[in-house]
Image (cartoon, coloured by chain):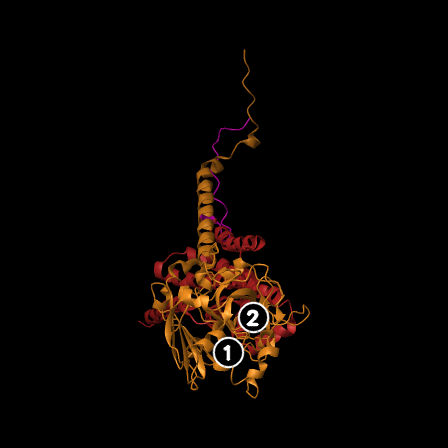
Amino acid sequence: MATSVLPTPDKPAAPRAGAGKLGWLVPAIVTGGLVPAVVLAARAARGDLGANPIAEAMNQLGLLALVLLVLSLAATPLQIVTGWKWPIRIRKALGLLGFFYVCAHFLVYAVVDQSLALRAIASDITKRPFILVGFAGFVLLLPLAATSTAKALKRMGFARWKRLHRLAYVVAILGVVHFVMRVKKDVTEPAIYGAVLAGLFLIRIMNWARERGNKRG
Amino acid sequence: MRRLPTPPPSSEITPEARYLRRREILKSAGLFVGTAAAMGTGLVALTGRGRRATITAEPLPAGLVVPSASAAPTAPSSSAAARNPFTTDEPRTPYEDVTTYNNYYELGLDKEDPARNAKTLKPRPWTVVFEGEIKKPQRVDIDTLLKWFPLEERVYRMRCVETWSMVIPWLGFPLGKLLERLEPTSRAKYVAFNTLMDPEQLPFQLTDVLEWPYREGLRLDEAMHPLTMLAAGLYGKSLPGQNGAPLRLVVPWKYGFKGIKSIVRIALVEKEPQTSWNMAAPREYGFYANVNPQVAHPRWSQAMERRIGDLEKRPTLPFNGYAEEVASLYAGMDLRMSY
């Protein structure tokens, strides 16, 4: 029979990356981040996207991409301001969700809106600054998505990886410009995203200046 | 003597550590569901658009001369094969789409907004002022005006400058008939139109998206063209607020923004009048605004359009398919310059 020696409790779950006490956080962000895609697909299937469903789907996917990219860029400033660690843990998930919606936005444009007419797409991209700006943002996101793994970070070295991933700011700015150029007149909504981005950037700059000051002092 | 039940094999006993972590797992599950739900609903609220409004059609006021539902289209030619620019036989855009997908900035900027917000616009009582270079300047009540002429149904293509299009059965009368009645003087060269200016009825006039009131204009020969009409209804019913009740302009060979809504003033003038979109962005929107697949908008091509309800785009036709009727109005003009 079993001895009566009390076993010592196991150590709480082996500390896998991303696991531990907040192990639920990243899966929750990813699940929540995909909810709008499911809602959009369901509404599209029911014919519930209004009179111009393709334009509506493109607008929603584009806006989702911008919101998630801005959220991913908010992680570091939020950590700077509050000292919390969890924003950094969800940064990658937010960035990849943004990339997912950028891809979906581009695919609806190329496949549904333009019926994969490659010449029309090519002339759209080269002749229309508004489309060129959006397309540039999409292309610049590709290396960021490709190097989003821990392995890529190790291979590149942190400094180089960090420098490359500063492109995320350029992409978000291109996203706002693309949005501004799309609206016929009222720029309030894109201006709000522009202002949020500027605020986030300002926090980083102030933090950077303070750190430099500390090193000197 | 009773036997004790067999104890479960030790392999099935929940390890104590796991037993103690039950609460933690439940808590994590709760946090997972809560966070995912908050994230999902937040994103949907921020980026999704609400339902479209349900539109109930209002009948036309009594006493108007209206074509019966089965009446033949008002084509001058009776031959079925003859081209009839006044009634296209293309499939009509459903009433629901025509009345819930609108650009009427005075009632909101998103396409679904005007239908939701149109309640504030009161199309009765309504007075239209006729003034300027005419021999019979006057103010007329809308219900009197609508009895001056028998109403005709005309099925026109409508091409928006944003590259979508519809086919709409309007109910109205030719603008030319009204102008003849007002007797333009020899100095009248253009017609200027104004929308109602009243932020209580058109609340977005409190914003400065455009300079209010909305204004539009036509050259006199364009205004006199038999295709140009003033509409008071669509699909045999009164014009809903979001479509420009109680009276709007319809010029089927021009981009939709020329079709000024909720008109309170029509003036004949000597000089080319100011027009709202031209004032807002002169490089993008000209005075003429003829549908032209050759002249791109600075930010997008005008070569193709999506008919509402279609998946695939179709080529845009010069003058929106009315070139045979109207191209001669612009003989000798450079339409790249006069866009």
Residue nearest the viewer, comparing B53 with B16 = B53
Tag 2 residue: A139
Where is residue B322, by image quadrant? bottom right
- Same chain assignment for discs 1 and 2: no
Image position, residue A206 (x, y; %): 35, 69
Q: Amino acid at mark 1?
A: Met
Residue A20: mark: none
Q: Is A110 left, or right, of A200 in this rendering?
A: right
> Which residue range is magenta in the image?
A1-21
Q: Residue at x 49, y 28 (%)?
A: A4
- Label 1 – label 2 distance at C-alpha: 52 Å
In the displayed image of the protein, which residue is found farthest to the left? A217
Q: Secondary structure at mark 2?
A: helix
Chain B shade in the render = orange
Q: Chain of mark 2?
A: A
Q: Furthest-bottom residue in view?
A: B332
Residues under numbered marks 1 and 2 in contact, where contact means CB atoms less than 8 Å apart: no
Q: Nearer the viewer, residue A129 or B152?
A: B152
The correct choice, above or below, for B275 with respect to B111 in the image is below
Instruction: Give the labeled residue for mark 1.
Output: B224
Chain identifier, red in the render: A
The type of residue carrying mark 2 is Val
With A34 as the anchor, is B108 left or right in this view? left
Magenta: main secondary structure: loop
